[in-house]
């Protein structure tokens, strides 16, 4: 699943690919916003992304299906 994070005052989005279900990630984001602590996510390759809750602009959760990659011919 792809997670896109918008950070305040930063033009570029953070994109994290994870194997966790959307419901679990959404619960963690809501918990972070309620507590004011940092959002701490680990991607599918084991890298950690930590974002302070006060700087979160938005969090977009993609679908659980894998992306399709291919070449389109006309």
Image (cartoon, rainbow, N blue to C red):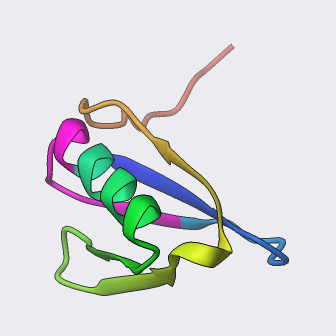
Q: Residue at x 26, y 86 (%)?
A: 47
* 70 horizontally vs 24: left or right: right
| Rendered view: 70 above or below 57 | above
Quadrant of residue 48 within the rendered picture: bottom left
Q: Nearer the viewer, residue 66 or 38?
A: 38
Res 26 → quadrant: top left
Which sits in the foreground, 35 or 68? 35
As drawn, 60 above or below 9: above
| Magenta-tinted stretch | 15-24
> Which quadrant of the structure image shows residue 12?
bottom right
> Which residue lies at the image location 16% right of the left edge and 42% below the top edge?
21
Q: Residue 56: percent from the left, percent from the top?
A: 62, 67
- Numbered circles on residues, count: 0
Q: Position of residue 73 (x, y in %)?
A: 61, 20
Between 69 and 73, the residue placed more toward the observer is: 69
* Residue found at the very far front of the displayed protein: 35
Place of residue 71 in the rendered image (x, y in percent of width and height, measured from the top left) = 52, 32
Residue 58 located within the stretch drawn in magenta: no
Tell me the quarter of the image containing the N terminus.
top left
Q: In the image, what residue occupies the spot 69% across and 13% down?
A: 74
Is 64 drawn above or below residue 19 in the view shown?
A: above
Q: Residue at x 77, y 71 (%)?
A: 8
Residue 14 position, x and y percent, is 57, 69
Left or right, 74 with respect to 5, comes to right
49, above or below 19, in the image: below
Q: Residue 19 magenta-drawn? A: yes
36 with respect to 35 (left or right) = right
């Amino acid at each position: 699943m792809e997670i896109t994070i918008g950070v305040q005052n930063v033009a570029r989005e953070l994109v994290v690919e994870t194997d966790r279900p959307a419901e679990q990630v959404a619960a963690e984001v809501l918990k972070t916003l309620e507590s004011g602590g940092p959002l701490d996510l680990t991607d599918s390759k084991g890298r950690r992304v930590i974002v302070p809750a006060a700087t979160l602009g938005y969090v977009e959760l993609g679908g659980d299906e894998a992306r399709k990659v291919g070449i389109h011919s006309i």
